[in-house]
Amino acid sequence: MNYIVTVGDKSFSIEIEGNKVIVDGRSRSVDIKSINGLSLYSLLVDGSSYEVFVEESEGEYRVLIEGELYTVRVEDERKRRLAEVMRFRPPPEGEVVVKAPMPGLVVDVPVKEGEAVRAKQCLLVLEAMKMENELRAQKDGIVKSVHVVKGDSVEEGQALITLSLQGTTDCSQRIGSG
């Protein structure tokens, strides 16, 4: 798995392969074991031993190592990149094709053709790299067509669902009357 780890104002690219951790391209041998079953760990990095206290709070970790306290944020690299792309996209208008952001397996399609959907409603669940990803509507609209079914394998960029996005008032009236 690839992660982006931010410590203070510095970010690092981390790749984990068994007991090997690659930090910004530099390979390290790492072994970690819980000492008390809670927050205290024994950490071996390239043969050097450390006692580490880790506490998670609101998506961040407070890590105490050798008397220094660090605030650490860990993000899945793929999710971070998707979030960055979505942040700069203006909300779509008219007919929009929802495409697979990565190759995967369709786990669920909870919407049907002709169904009214609301912004942020789940349109499809895609499993990729052993993680389930919910693809959601960006705006209120109507499902014009569904191009896949549960169990389908899809490629990156493949059309999954076509939506007709309309003005919020019009769509709200359709949803309320259905």
Image (tube, rainbow, N blue to C red):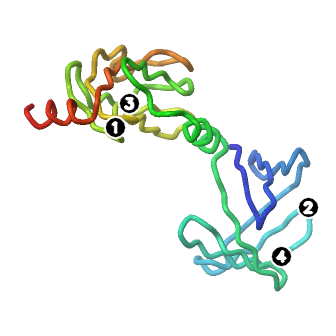
Q: Please report whichever mark, 3 or 2, sits nearer to the chain's N-terminal start.
A: 2
Q: Amino acid at mark 3?
A: Val
In the drawing, does residue 163 fall left or right of residue 92?
Answer: left
Question: What is the total number of numbered labels drawn onto the structure image?
Answer: 4
Secondary structure at badge 3 equals: strand
Disc 2 target residue = 46
Q: Nearer the viewer, mark 3 or mark 2?
A: 3
Which label number is shown at residue 122?
A: 1
* Numbered disc 2: secondary structure: loop
Per the model, the C-alpha gap separating discs 3 and 2 is: 41 Å
Residue in the foreground of this view, choosing between 178 and 92: 92
Q: CA distance from mark 2 to mark 1?
A: 44 Å
Gap between marks 4 and 1, in whole Å? 44 Å
Indicate which disc residue 50 carries. 4
Who comes first in sequence, dot 3 or dot 4?
4
Query: How crowded is the residue under tag 3: few (<14 C-alpha within 10 Å), some, or many (20+)?
Result: some
Label located before the other in sequence (2 or 1): 2
* 47 vs 74, nearest the viewer: 74
